[in-house]
């Protein structure tokens, strides 16, 4: 396992700032430990919990910003839907999110060739109308985001040693 390190004081400050800031301390430390770039080579340096947390961070940022269509267009579909992310998140006790990811994965495999293609900004914006099947999934994520992020933060807090080494 790659040793991502965080300062105890940074963790305490982030925890008091809220769950998003708390998780950001972990994702930032993990990304810094692999030189700031997540590739096949750098992923090999991480454990499954670290990869799962980074995958959740990507999922959260992309879906909250532009939904699953944006996530797929930006090239993250393969990372999230071809790997056992749904199984891992279910192992963390977040069953509803795992179910949502599986549903989105089915749509990814159905539409990936069309969504991942190079296109103009106008063509990209039109995709949101072309693939309305993602709308309910986007809405479900947004409606449950706070609960699911809280559950992720709780899991990380209960298993800190799987993610980072805390230093004084």
Image (spheres, rainbow, N blue to C red):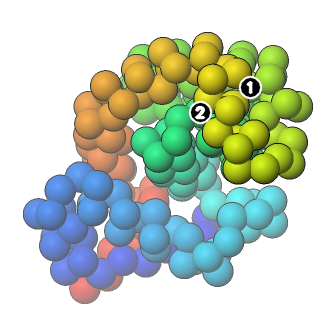
Which quadrant does the C terminus fall into? Answer: bottom left
In this picture, is 71 found above or below 97?
below
Give the secondary structure at mark 1: helix
In this picture, is 78 found above or below 5?
above
Identity of the residue drawn at 24% across and 52% down: 19
Of residues 14 and 132, the one nearer the viewer is: 132
Of residues 147 and 156, the one nearer the viewer is: 147
Q: Are marks 1 and 2 in contact (CB under 8 Å)?
A: yes
Q: CA distance from mark 1 to mark 2?
A: 9 Å
Numbered label attached to residue 68: 2
**Residue 149 place in picture, x, y as percent:** 32, 40
Identity of the residue drawn at 24% across and 77% down: 10
Identity of the residue drawn at 46% across and 73% down: 29
> Which one is earlier in the sequence, the residue at label 1 or at label 2?
2
**Residue 153 place in picture, x, y as percent:** 30, 47
Identity of the residue drawn at 41% across and 23% down: 139
Q: Is residue 152 left or right of residue 128?
A: left
Of residues 47 and 69, the one nearer the viewer is: 69
Give the secondary structure at mark 2: helix
Q: Is residue 26 left or right of residue 128?
A: left
In this picture, is 65 found above or below 104?
below
Q: Is residue 150 visible?
A: yes
List the residue tagged with mark 1. 108
Instruction: Specify few, some or many for label 2: CA neighbours under 10 Å numbering under 14, 14-19, or 20 or more.
Output: many
Tally the marks: 2
Of residues 163 and 54, the one nearer the viewer is: 54
**Residue 16 place in picture, x, y as percent:** 11, 63
Which quadrant does the N terminus fall into? Answer: bottom right
Instruction: Specify few, some or many for label 1: CA neighbours under 10 Å numbering under 14, 14-19, or 20 or more.
Output: many
């Amino acid at each position: 396992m790659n040793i991502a390190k965080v300062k105890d004081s940074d963790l305490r400050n982030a925890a008091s700032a809220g769950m998003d800031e708390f998780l950001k301390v972990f994702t930032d430390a993990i990304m810094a430990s692999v030189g700031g770039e997540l590739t096949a080579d750098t992923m090999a340096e991480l454990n499954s919990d670290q990869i799962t947390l980074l995958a959740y961070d990507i999922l959260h940022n992309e879906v909250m910003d532009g939904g699953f269509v944006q996530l797929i267009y930006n090239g993250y579909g393969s990372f999230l839907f071809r790997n056992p992310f749904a199984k891992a998140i279910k192992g963390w006790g977040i069953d509803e999110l795992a179910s949502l990811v599986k549903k989105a994965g089915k749509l990814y495999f159905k539409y990936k060739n069309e969504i991942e293609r190079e296109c103009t900004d106008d063509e990209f914006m039109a995709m949101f109308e072309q693939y309305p099947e993602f709308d309910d999934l986007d809405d479900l994520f947004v409606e449950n985001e706070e609960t699911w992020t809280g559950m992720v933060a709780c899991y990380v807090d209960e298993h800190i040693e799987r993610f980072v080494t805390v230093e004084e």
